[in-house]
Amino acid sequence: MMPEIKHCSVKECFYNKDNKCHAEAITIGSMSPKCDTYCKGAQHGGPAGQGHVGACHVNDCRWNTDMSCTAEGVDISPHGAEPDCDTFTPR
Ligand code: SF4
C-alpha cells in the first residue's frame, strides 16, 4: 500500500487543492527529502482524489525500505524554496 499524503501546504503546486495533494503518486528526491513531483502552476487539480507516495529515494530515512516509504502517511510543506517531506526521520 502506498502511504497517503495527509497534508500538503505547498499551495502553488498544480496538484494542490485545499491543502491536499491530488497527484496519483509522488516521488520524493535523493539528496534531501524534497517532493520531485512539485509543479508550479496557476491551475489546481490532479488525476487523483487522494495523493500517495509512489517512490522515495531518501535512503537515510527510517521509514525507507527498498526505496519505498513505509510510513502510515506523510505531510509535505515548504522549506525555503523547496517542498519537503516533514515525516522524514533520520535513521
Ligand atoms: S517519511 Fe521518509 S521514506 Fe517516507 S516519503 Fe518521507 S522521507 Fe521518504
Image (spheres, rainbow, N blue to C red):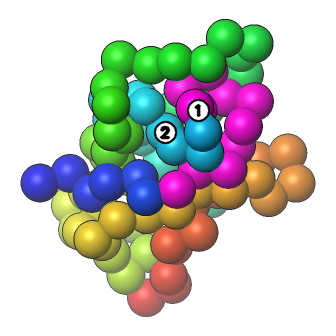
Q: Which mark is residue 21?
A: 2
Q: Main secondary structure of the magenta part?
A: loop
Q: Nearer the viewer, residue 23 or 63?
A: 23
20 relative to 32, above or below: above
Q: Residue at x 20, y 51 (%)?
A: 2
Q: Is residue 61 left or right of residue 34?
A: left
How far across and down, in percent of the image, does residue 88 sit? 51, 73
89 relative to 85, above or below: below
Looking at this view, name the residue that lies furthest to the front: 18
Is there CB contact under 8 Å for labels 2 and 1?
Answer: yes
Q: Is residue 39 magenta?
A: no
Question: Dot 1 corresponds to which residue?
Answer: 16
Instruction: Identify the amino acid type marked 1.
Output: Asn
Instruction: Identify the amino acid type marked 2.
Output: Cys
Query: Element type at marker 1?
Result: strand
Bounds of the magenta segment: 7-17
How far across and down, in percent of the image, does residue 57 sit? 41, 53
Q: Mark 2 or mark 1: name the one nearer the start of the chain.
A: 1
User: Is the residue marked by circle 2 packed among few (<14), some (14-19), or many (20+) residues within 10 Å?
Assistant: many
How far across and down, in percent of the image, does residue 25 sit? 33, 35
Q: Is residue 45 left or right of residue 66?
A: right
Q: Residue at x 33, y 39 (%)?
A: 50
Query: Element type at marker 2?
Result: strand
